[in-house]
Amino acid sequence: MILAIDGFGASGKSVLAARLAEQFAGNVVALDDFTRPGTPTWEHERFVDEVLTPLRAGRGAAYRPWRYDQDAPSPTVHLPPGGLLIVEGVSALALAAVALAGEWWDLSVWVDADEDLRRARIAERDGEALLPLWREQWWPSEQRYFADESPLERADFVLRAR
């Protein structure tokens, strides 16, 4: 089974994915691992080629996450075939992603959290110094994604974070 989890930054996607993976012995792939600096979105085709195609064929998969701090790929991550795969990240339900992988999502979730909660989580997780970057770059990008792509229309479930 492949579960896609989408939502704005700091909505709780990663926490939900980790808890589900622990509870159901699943594996998590963060779409941030398929995003390189200067690219507008994650690498849809690489994700499909390296992760989805082999797993759906019953084979193991392998990919190299991108390390922002070194501007280079990390060591290879290996995923066993079978079981639960949780794919989490902003724009998991983007039209381009759904066009390539949408028929492969068995279930999809949008995690909703209000802006005050997300702001508090960002300050705690990333520090107050990064809040301007969130306000000026990431939040506007997320709002455009939400307005232009209507990901809620493709979500099987909407979970409200608290």
Image: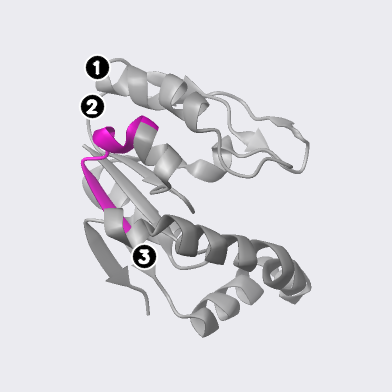
In this rendering, would 53 be left or right of 2? right
Q: Look at 40% across and 55% down and name the residue there.
A: 6
Q: The N terminus lies in which quarter of the figure? A: top left
Q: Amino acid at mark 3?
A: Val
Secondary element under disc 3, as helix, strand or loop, is strand
| Badge 2 vs badge 1, beta-carbon distance below 8 Å | yes
**Quadrant (top left, top right, bottom left, bottom right) of the C terminus:** bottom left
Q: Return the disc, 3 or 1, that comes first in the chain's sequence.
A: 1
Colour option used: one colour
Q: Label 2's element?
A: loop
Q: Is residue 63 above or below residue 130?
A: above
Q: Which residues are magenta?
A: 100-109
| Label 3 – label 1 distance at C-alpha | 29 Å
**Seen from this angle, which residue lies furthest bottom?**
116
| Spatial separation of the CA atoms under disc 2 and disc 1 | 7 Å
Amino acid type of disc 2?
A: Gly
Instruction: Name the kind of residue labelled 1 in the image.
Output: Gly
- Where does the image place residue 17, in percent across and percent down from the top left? 36, 53
The Cα–Cα distance between marks 3 and 2, rounded to whole angstroms, is 25 Å
Q: Within the magenta stretch, is there residue 107?
A: yes
Q: Residue at the location (38% across, 49% down)? A: 93
